[in-house]
Image (cartoon, helix red, strand yellow):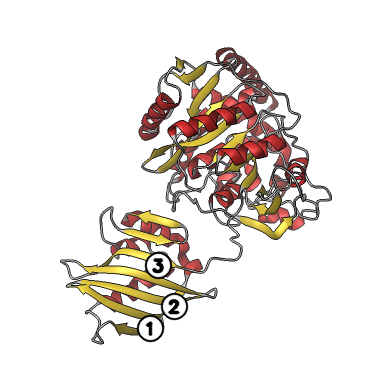
């Protein structure tokens, strides 16, 4: 590493060992050595780092975030400016040149411990952002499609999930090997065209989990989109790109799909509004399927009013039903995550203090019926491509397709019978009532979560989200809960056709009890 030019505020030599510590920390960051990085950070919850993605607290979380940058964040320090702030305390401002071009400025407060080692207490990093963040976008225009001159969505901007056909563009479904051989689309999906005809501009094509077969938001081909509300956490998927684009302010409407929670989960994780409409209410023509019995087109926004405007366009002409006055809350524990369970209890007391507590079918049974039937449909939709392209998918999605390949016709029929029984049971319980449940079982897991931790969160969440999937009901996530790990949405599930009423009801509730604003 080239030695940087070093200056001090008083012209004297810098404190012993400080410059060496700064450079050693930089080497550990580039190599992705999490253990070494943690050693350069003061222990305790008040150690903080701020960069373009937001604020991260605590040495372990900071070290994990820095390690994920690795060579992608490689840079060389050009100069260090040291300002003594007291005995054993120095403020270091450094300028770095990135291996990818551009310069960054880093401001750090270093303190010397009783053991003589220098450690970082706070850091602020300013870096030039990429013109296009490929973790969020696969293709961007200025705009990609210009909206109509007039319309109710004039001035709005749309991030389109990479499942929708757009004329003149290849559809990528989140898989690099797929888009390479994909043909140019000749028509634009009706769901996209409706927004454009209403005046909205399409900014670009936003990323998705591979084949949309995940609710985590991870993508090994293009990188995981950042979580704008919780730096260092997963964004939620599979509408991860549209969600992050909206949360970052790069679009005002995210056009996504929701099969098992792919709109509601990223909305929950990133503090957004997210609507999964009544099944079949918005045409799926020109949209890559995953499991047609459950697939829906929906929207993500930063506020309820924009969601209402988008849904008014997309649902124009769809059957309408007003929900009844009764509000239902599941009796007993709805999530194994105690912080979310407590927050849900408080939020429902504020939203609907007179709600009836009603037992529902076991969440594990709902998940199992959904899982098997979804697997069978997913394999029919994409199994031939997956089988012909071994190694093209990430481990998590590949393992789901492997399991899907083993679903026999007999096993599918058993699951279909179970699905019909459970859907009928749910319909009998819910009727025209409004059901309140958490939109996700937990806050967004950290990027450092283990496979087992991610799978546990996934299964707990799917037990909740599949209620809407099994019954074809609309479900709306609104950001009204906050736990130590970040935002968690409350989901309003209404009778089929009550989509617009759900949004209007949620807007009134939000005005009364407030919403969490992250985007």
Mark 1, residue position:
4
Classify 3 as above or below 156: below
Q: Can the viewer see residue 519?
A: yes
Which is nearer the N-term, disc 1 or disc 2? 1
Residue projecting furthest to the front: 150
Q: Nearer the viewer, mark 3 or mark 2?
A: 2
Question: In this image, 240 relative to 172: left or right?
Answer: left
Mark 3, residue position:
29
Secondary structure under badge 1? loop
Mark 2, residue position:
76
What distance separates the C-alpha of mark 3 from that of mark 2?
11 Å
Q: Which mark is residue 225?
A: none
Query: Where in the figure is residue 88, as x and y percent of width and height?
Result: 19, 72
Query: Where in the figure is residue 380, as x and y percent of width and height?
Result: 72, 36
Mark 2 residue crowding within 10 angstroms, few (<14) / some (14–19) / many (20+): many
Classify 347 as above or below 199: above
Q: What residue lies at 26% left-to-right and 66% top-to-bottom?
A: 119
Which is nearer the N-term, disc 3 or disc 2? 3
Query: Where in the figure is residue 3, as x and y percent of width and height?
Result: 37, 84
Query: Where in the figure is residue 92, as x and y percent of width and height?
Result: 32, 74
């Amino acid at each position: 590493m080239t030695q940087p030019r070093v200056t001090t505020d008083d012209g004297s030599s810098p404190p012993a060992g400080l410059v060496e510590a700064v450079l050693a920390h930089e080497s550990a960051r580039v190599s992705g050595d999490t253990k070494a990085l943690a050693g350069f950070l003061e222990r305790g919850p008040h150690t903080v780092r701020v960069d373009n993605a937001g604020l991260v607290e605590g040495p372990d979380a900071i070290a994990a975030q820095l390690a994920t940058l690795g060579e992608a964040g490689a840079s060389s320090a050009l100069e260090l400016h040291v300002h003594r702030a007291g005995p054993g305390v120095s403020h270091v401002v450094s300028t770095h040149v990135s291996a990818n071009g551009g310069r960054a400025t880093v401001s750090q407060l270093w303190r010397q411990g009783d053991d003589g080692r220098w450690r970082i207490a706070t850091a602020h990093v300013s870096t030039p952002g990429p013109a296009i963040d490929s973790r969020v976008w696969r293709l961007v225009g200025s705009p990609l499609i210009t909206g109509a001159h007039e319309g109710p969505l004039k001035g709005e901007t749309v991030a389109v999930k990479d499942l929708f056909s757009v004329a003149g563009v290849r559809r990528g479904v989140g898989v690099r090997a797929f888009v390479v051989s994909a043909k140019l689309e000749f028509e634009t999906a009706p769901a996209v065209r409706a927004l454009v005809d209403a005046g909205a501009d399409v900014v670009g094509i936003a990323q998705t989990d591979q084949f949309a077969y995940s609710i985590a938001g991870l993508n090994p081909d293009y990188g995981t989109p950042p979580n704008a509300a919780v730096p260092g956490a997963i964004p939620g998927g599979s509408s991860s790109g549209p969600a992050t684009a909206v949360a970052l302010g790069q679009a005002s409407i995210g056009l996504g799909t929701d099969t098992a929670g792919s709109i509601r989960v990223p909305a929950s994780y990133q503090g957004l509004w997210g609507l999964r409409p009544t099944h079949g209410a918005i045409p799926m023509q020109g949209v890559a399927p995953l499991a047609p019995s459950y697939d829906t087109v929906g929207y993500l926004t930063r506020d309820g009013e924009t969601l209402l405007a988008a849904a008014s366009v997309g649902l124009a002409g769809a059957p309408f039903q007003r929900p009844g006055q009764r509000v239902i809350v599941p009796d007993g524990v709805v999530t194994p995550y105690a912080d979310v369970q407590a927050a849900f209890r408080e939020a429902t007391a504020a939203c609907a203090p007179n709600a009836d507590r009603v037992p529902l079918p076991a969440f594990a049974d709902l998940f199992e019926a959904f899982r098997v039937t979804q697997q069978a449909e997913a394999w029919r939709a994409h199994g031939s491509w997956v089988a012909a392209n071994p190694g093209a998918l990430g481990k998590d999605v590949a393992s789901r397709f492997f399991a899907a390949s083993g679903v026999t016709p007999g096993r599918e029929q058993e699951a279909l019978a179970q699905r019909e029984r459970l859907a009928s049971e749910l319909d009998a319980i819910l009727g025209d009532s409004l059901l309140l449940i958490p939109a996700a079982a937990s806050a967004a897991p950290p990027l450092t979560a283990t496979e087992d931790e991610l799978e546990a969160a996934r299964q707990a969440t799917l037990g909740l989200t599949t209620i809407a999937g099994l019954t074809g009901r609309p479900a709306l996530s609104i950001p009204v809960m906050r736990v130590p790990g970040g935002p968690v949405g409350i989901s309003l599930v209404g009778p089929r056709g009550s989509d617009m009423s759900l949004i209007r009801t949620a807007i009134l509730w939000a005005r009364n009890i407030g919403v969490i604003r992250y985007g």
